[in-house]
Every structure is written in structure tokens, then in C-alpha cells.
């Protein structure tokens, strides 16, 4: 497959934005999703932790959170599907001097059209939430979270102290859930003026830090809203699978017949209720497919039972991780699913996970995958 | 004062390797203050060399008159109007634009 400089998608095409440890790639296919073209790499040598697609009919935009190990992190953007990129001269995501913090990486970029047509939120390491009102060109911090009373109790995981999940509520512009490793899930009901930890019902294996033993951190890995009921949220955390039916107030264990507690990503079906997908891995530090057999597990009853899907995936000798942002669904019918591995393979399914194939084998380690259908 | 820029930073200074700035003969300032001034003249350099707290980034090495500031007074290392400042990304090198691979037997010239 020849690598091109940029893509020229038509209405109805699917694009995949794939962030890796060595830059970003864009894949394009028509809605059949049989053949993908690849363009890139963009920002060669940089880690791309996050991407987003802003679907404006006049000028759709691709955002990326790119990090140079030498020169730091910025949000950059392309308004022509990768043909050219805007890299801000001065940092567009910066911590105020009084915070004592300095930006490490940009873990999440999430448009919030219900909050505002041009609004994009960024989740950062160290854990903070920033907001843009100009489609990702400039950002400012959410002060309530930056100065949260529990911040001194938050502890970094292997990936850092990252705010990795940003979930604007699909119906209420004042409400939002966020996930922080390792602190837990927090929710605002007042447009970001205040944030309350929402970990009730989640098993805590670890005590809090020595200076705050009462604080029980939870290493949330990924959360998703149910397609039909935003009060229902699915959560993959470090040691388990959970569901909330009350907007995050309380959680119930939905591991049931899953083979492991550990995994990183969680994907909810974009249009079918009670349907979600996970990729269980061997825990704790090995973090590879169980018995070397790669499987995606699906529930169609909100986690009461799970079914393994593996046709086309490796049945043995698969020793890769799939990171929390490297698994995504598109919005076509039938839905497409995509996941990238730390071994550099990008797997795709165009039949809702029933069958899989590799569409790229030798990418750098994949950090994130986002999908968009061009309108 | 002369600043020697690595290739990755030159696009923020009109593609120049060396940027010269004039200061009074009795100048006394820290290397961080000097980089702040350089960044004012050439937006894009400051944030790539200094972090959000105004410290030299962890993987950037800055030499003043041949000495790595990490082994001097760090961010507080003094510079003068005549200082030579060299900025390097840590452990960098190699060939960012390597030669094309030779065409293999049976393969068409002008590969994509």
C-alpha cells in the first residue's frame, strides 16, 4: 500500500486518524471499508496521543495533540485532510505559572457541539481539563479542576497523571464526566464550576497515599456512554468492568464471564442500546492477549454476559497491548470497529466485530485511533 | 550575544542557524531571561526550549560559552553581551532525509 501525502475523502467515506509514537497516519476508505488508503506520517518522530475530527461542512478540521520529547506538546490542526498543518508558534496549551505544573502530554481532544459549535475540550497530563472556543486553536484551563481540593491525593500511573477521558453529556451541556488515572471518575453538573468524585461501588484494591489514606484512588481506564441512555455508562478500570445506570453516581460490577479484569479500552455501540466491546488482557503487568489469542468481547445486554469475537484475529502467539484510546467504532450501519496495537498492527472489522482483518501491519506503536464518516 | 539554533528550531527564526542579539556591554542576566528575549523576537522558540514554569526543558541542552548550564548554575547561569549560546536537543543526530534506497532487481524505477 503506497503512502500518500494527504487524502481527498468524498462524502460518505470513512477516515481513521491513527496516532502513534512516531507520528500520525490517516486512513481512508469508502463506506464498504474493503480497501484503505494510507497517508502520512505527519509530525514524524513525535508522539500523537490524541486526535479529533471537527465536522464542519465548509472546513472540516483534524486536530492532533502531538508531543516532541525535546520541544514539548501542542495542539496542531489541518483543514485540508493532512495536505498542510498549522503548528502554533507559542504553546496553545500551557499551565499557569502559579500552578507549579508544566504540560507533559495531551491525552484527549473532544469536541462538545452541545456546549458550543466551536468548543473542544482537552484532557492533559498532568491531569487538567482545558477548553477551546475556537476549534482547537487556543485553550484555557478549567480552574475548578485545576485547583481541586483532592488534587494533592491524585497519583500517577504508568502512563503519568493523565486526564484521558472527556465525555460531554449528549443532552445536557452543563454535565460532563471525566476519567483520571489514578484518581477516578469525576462529574460536573454545573458546566465545570465544580467537580465531584464518582467512584461509589468500584472495588478499590489500593489504599490512598500516605498523607490521605481516606482517599481511595481508582485507576479509570476508559468510559463510554450507552448509545440510547446517557445515564448508563460503561467503565473499564484497572481491575474490573463496571456499569452505572445513574450517570456515574453508583457502579455495579459487570465482569461476569469475561476472562480477565484487566484491559484498557471500552467501546460502546454508537446506535445500539446495551451493546459494548472490550479487549481483556492478562493483568497486571504482562498486559497481552490471554493465552496469546486476541479476542474482542461483546455484550448485548449491558454487561450481563459477554461473547468473544475473534474471527480473523490471531489465535496464538499474539503478545501486544491495546491502549485505552486505540479502539474505536465508526457510525455506519453495519458499524465498523478498529483497534491498533503497540506492535504496530491496525485491525478493522466492517461487520460489527464478527470478523476482522489487518489493514496495516508495520506501523509504529499505536497510541490512539479515531474514526469519522465524512458528511 | 549569539544563539546557535538546532535545525528543528530554525523555522521559528527565518531558517537561520545563528541569531545575533545586541545587548549593553554591562549586561547581566540569566540564560533563561536571555531565551525569553530571544523568544520575544522569534515566537516559537521560547515554548520549545522552556517549559510552562520557565525552566529549560528536560531533554534540551543549553551551552553557554562551551559549558552545559546543567553543570553550571542551571536556569540561573549568567550570560553576558558576548556569550555564545548553543541549544541542542538531547541525544539527537542521524539523517532525517536519508538517500533513496537502491532499486531492487525486478523492481520498477521511480517507485512511489
Image (tube, rainbow, N blue to C red):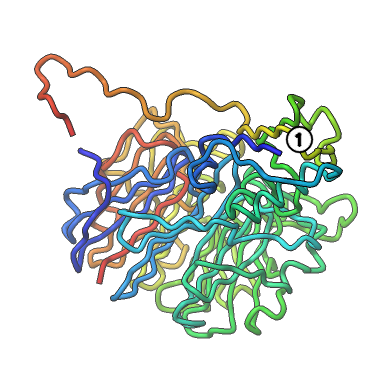
Q: With respect to residue B5, does A43 lie above or below? A: below
Q: Give the crowd class for mark 1: few <14, some 14-19, many >=20 residues within 10 Å.
A: some
Query: What residue is drawn where x is 78% and y is 69%?
Result: A148
Query: What residue is drawn where x is 59% and y is 39%?
Result: A69
Of A274 and A31, which appears nearest the observer? A31
Q: Quadrant of residue A56?
A: bottom left
Q: Is residue A372 left or right of residue A142?
A: left
Q: With respect to residue A342, does B105 lie above or below? A: above
Residue at mark 1: chain: B
Query: What residue is drawn where x is 62% and y is 34%?
Result: B4
Whether residue B98 is visible, yes or no, is: yes
Residue A343 spot, x, y in % from top left = 42, 34
Question: What quarter of the picture does the N terminus of chain A occupy?
Answer: top left
Query: What residue is drawn where x is 60% and y is 51%?
Result: A105
Residue at the spot of label 1: B82
Instruction: Work out which residue is located at the far front of the displayed protein and give it.
Output: B25
Question: What quarter of the picture does the C terminus of chain A occupy?
Answer: bottom left
Residue A368 spot, x, y in % from top left = 45, 50
Q: Is residue B4 left or right of residue A193?
A: left
Q: With respect to residue B3, does A226 lie above or below? A: below
Whether residue A289 is visible, yes or no, is: no
Residue A192 spot, x, y in % from top left = 66, 78
Instruction: Work out which residue is located at the far top of the displayed protein and give it.
Output: B105
Q: Is residue A292 left or right of residue A202?
A: left
Of A289 and B24, which appears nearest the observer? B24
- Number of labels in the image equals 1
Residue A160 spot, x, y in % from top left = 66, 47
Instruction: Work out which residue is located at the far right of the displayed protein and give it.
Output: A211
Amino acid at each position: 500500500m503506497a503512502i500518500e501525502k494527504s487524502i481527498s475523502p468524498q462524502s460518505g467515506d470513512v477516515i481513521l486518524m491513527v496516532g502513534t509514537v512516531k507520528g500520525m497516519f490517516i486512513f481512508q476508505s469508502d463506506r464498504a471499508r474493503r480497501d484503505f488508503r494510507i497517508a502520512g506520517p505527519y509530525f514524524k518522530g513525535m508522539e500523537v496521543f490524541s486526535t479529533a475530527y471537527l465536522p464542519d461542512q465548509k472546513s472540516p478540521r483534524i486536530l492532533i495533540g502531538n508531543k516532541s520529547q525535546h520541544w514539548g506538546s501542542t495542539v496542531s490542526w489541518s483543514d485540508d485532510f493532512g495536505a498542510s498543518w498549522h503548528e502554533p508558534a507559542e504553546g496553545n496549551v500551557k499551565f499557569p505559572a502559579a500552578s507549579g505544573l508544566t504540560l507533559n502530554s495531551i491525552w484527549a481532544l473532544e469536541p462538545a457541539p452541545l456546549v458550543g459549535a466551536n468548543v473542544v475540550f482537552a484532557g492533559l497530563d498532568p491531569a487538567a481539563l482545558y477548553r477551546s472556543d475556537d476549534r482547537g486553536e487556543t485553550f484555557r484551563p478549567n480552574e475548578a479542576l485545576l485547583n481541586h481540593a483532592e488534587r494533592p491525593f491524585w497519583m500517577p500511573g504508568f502512563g503519568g497523571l493523565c486526564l484521558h477521558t472527556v465525555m460531554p453529556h449528549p443532552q445536557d451541556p452543563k454535565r460532563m464526566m471525566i476519567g483520571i488515572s489514578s484518581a477516578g471518575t469525576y462529574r460536573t453538573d454545573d458546566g465545570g464550576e465544580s467537580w465531584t468524585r464518582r467512584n461509589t461501588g468500584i472495588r478499590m484494591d489500593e489504599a490512598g497515599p500516605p498523607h490521605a489514606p481516606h482517599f481511595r484512588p481508582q485507576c479509570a481506564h476508559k468510559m463510554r456512554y450507552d448509545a440510547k441512555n446517557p445515564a448508563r455508562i460503561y467503565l473499564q478500570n484497572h481491575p474490573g468492568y463496571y456499569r452505572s445506570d445513574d450517570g456515574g453516581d453508583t457502579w455495579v460490577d459487570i465482569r461476569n464471564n469475561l476472562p480477565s479484569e484487566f484491559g484498557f479500552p471500552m467501546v460502546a455501540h454508537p446506535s445500539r442500546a446495551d451493546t459494548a466491546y472490550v479487549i481483556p488482557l492478562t493483568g497486571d503487568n504482562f498486559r497481552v492477549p490471554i493465552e496469546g489469542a486476541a479476542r474482542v468481547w461483546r455484550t448485548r445486554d449491558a454487561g450481563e454476559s459477554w461473547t468473544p469475537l475473534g474471527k480473523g484475529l490471531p489465535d496464538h502467539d499474539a503478545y501486544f497491548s491495546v491502549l485505552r484510546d486505540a479502539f474505536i467504532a465508526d457510525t455506519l450501519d453495519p458499524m465498523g470497529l478498529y483497534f491498533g496495537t503497540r506492535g504496530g498492527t491496525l485491525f478493522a472489522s466492517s461487520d460489527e466485530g464478527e470478523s476482522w482483518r489487518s489493514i496495516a501491519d508495520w506501523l509504529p506503536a499505536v497510541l490512539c485511533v479515531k474514526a469519522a464518516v465524512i458528511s | 550575544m549569539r544563539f546557535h539554533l538546532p535545525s528543528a528550531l530554525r523555522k521559528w527564526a527565518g531558517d537561520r542557524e545563528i541569531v545575533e542579539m545586541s545587548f549593553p556591554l554591562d549586561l547581566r542576566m540569566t540564560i533563561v531571561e536571555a531565551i525569553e528575549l530571544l523568544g520575544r523576537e522569534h515566537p516559537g522558540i521560547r515554548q520549545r526550549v522552556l517549559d510552562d514554569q520557565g525552566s529549560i526543558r528536560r531533554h534540551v541542552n543549553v551551552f553557554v560559552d562551551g559549558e552545559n548550564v546543567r553543570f553550571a548554575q542551571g536556569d540561573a547561569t549568567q550570560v553576558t553581551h558576548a556569550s555564545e549560546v548553543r541549544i541542542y536537543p538531547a541525544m539527537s543526530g542521524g539523517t532525517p532525509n536519508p538517500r533513496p534506497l537502491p532499486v531492487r532487481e525486478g523492481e520498477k524505477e521511480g517507485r512511489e
